[in-house]
Image: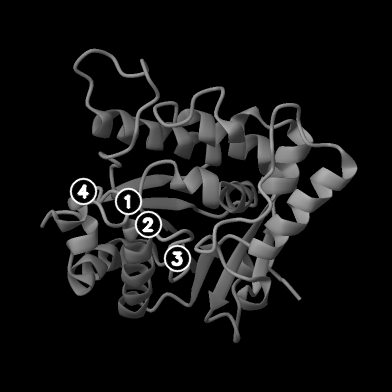
Amino acid sequence: MSFHAHPDDESIGTAGTLAKAAAAGHRVVLVFATRGELGEPVPGVLAEGEQLSVRRSYECYESAKVIGAARVEFLGYTDSGMMGEPSNEAPFCFWQASVEHAAKRLAIILDEEEPDVLTVYDDNGGYGHPDHIQVHRVGLRAAELAAVPVVAQNTINRDWMVRGMQGLRDSGATPEGWQAPDQPPPSFGKPESEITHRVEAVDFTEQKRSSMRCHASQMGPDHFMLAMPDPVFAIGFGTEFYIVTGAESMPSELFTDLFLPLR
């Protein structure tokens, strides 16, 4: 089971892992805390009167088909917006939810599915978004309530990014008109020393990119991730990184199929 804050998060962060699991015959389930009501739609993509939350919900199901997920669920909270925005204070947003109450909602689905692995985010939510941080908190507590054997915290490998950006510059392979930043922002991801596992999903990068394309309300054809040449996309998105807890004893077949120690 893969727990996410908003529609499209599953595509960017874990689609390679999930597609690889589905291809190996494992059941894959997606759960979203919100429907991404506060996303910024691509200009002109919504029909007149079309609600963004409805469109983004539909996009989740289309993405699930591409990934091979068997079930999609929503916990029913609303998007909190970026950290520090007034929307963080809305009493019904995910950021304001009781961790215990939200975890009990998620634990109901966990009890039904009995997954071997639950994916969440790292303790900073990858880049500091309040809903992503809340996914970490709620997911870990729900895993305790439902006795999920392994929790894998999806994260961004900062050192990998720095090496990749430098390699692109050194090789001259940077796509025309695309300037790789020197360093990711300080709040972005985790140092490699804190990351325990990786999933090699290069063979599933086309599914991953197709999953991203399903979220057309957020990522148009000219979005920088979709516009990357195939080799650059494969380097940047073909390996997914995790901080894993609970896999020390009796790892499941699913875990050993997918997760490789980083060191």
Please say if 227 is above or below 90.
above
**Which corner quadrant of the image does residue 148 belong to?**
bottom left
Q: Are marks 1 and 3 in contact (CB under 8 Å)?
A: no
Q: Disc 4 marks which amino acid?
A: Thr
Q: Earlier in the sequence, mark 2 or mark 4?
A: 4
Q: Which mark is residue 129?
A: 2
Location of mark 1 (residue): 82
Neighbours of disc 3 within 10 Å: few (<14), some (14-19), many (20+): many
Q: Which mark is residue 108?
A: none
**Which tag is nearer the camera, tag 2 or tag 4?**
2
Q: Nearer the viewer, residue 204 or 6?
A: 6
User: Does residue 36 appear left or right of residue 62 in this picture?
Assistant: left
**Which tag is nearer the camera, tag 1 or tag 4?**
1
Disc 3 and disc 2: Cα gap in Å? 26 Å
Disc 3 on helix, strand or loop? loop
Disc 1 and disc 4: Cα gap in Å? 13 Å
Disc 1 on helix, strand or loop? loop
Q: Residue furthest right?
A: 171
Disc 2 and disc 4: Cα gap in Å? 14 Å
**Which corner quadrant of the image does residue 125 belong to?**
bottom left
**Which corner quadrant of the image does residue 179 belong to?**
top right
Location of mark 3 (residue): 115
Please say if 1 is above or below 42.
below
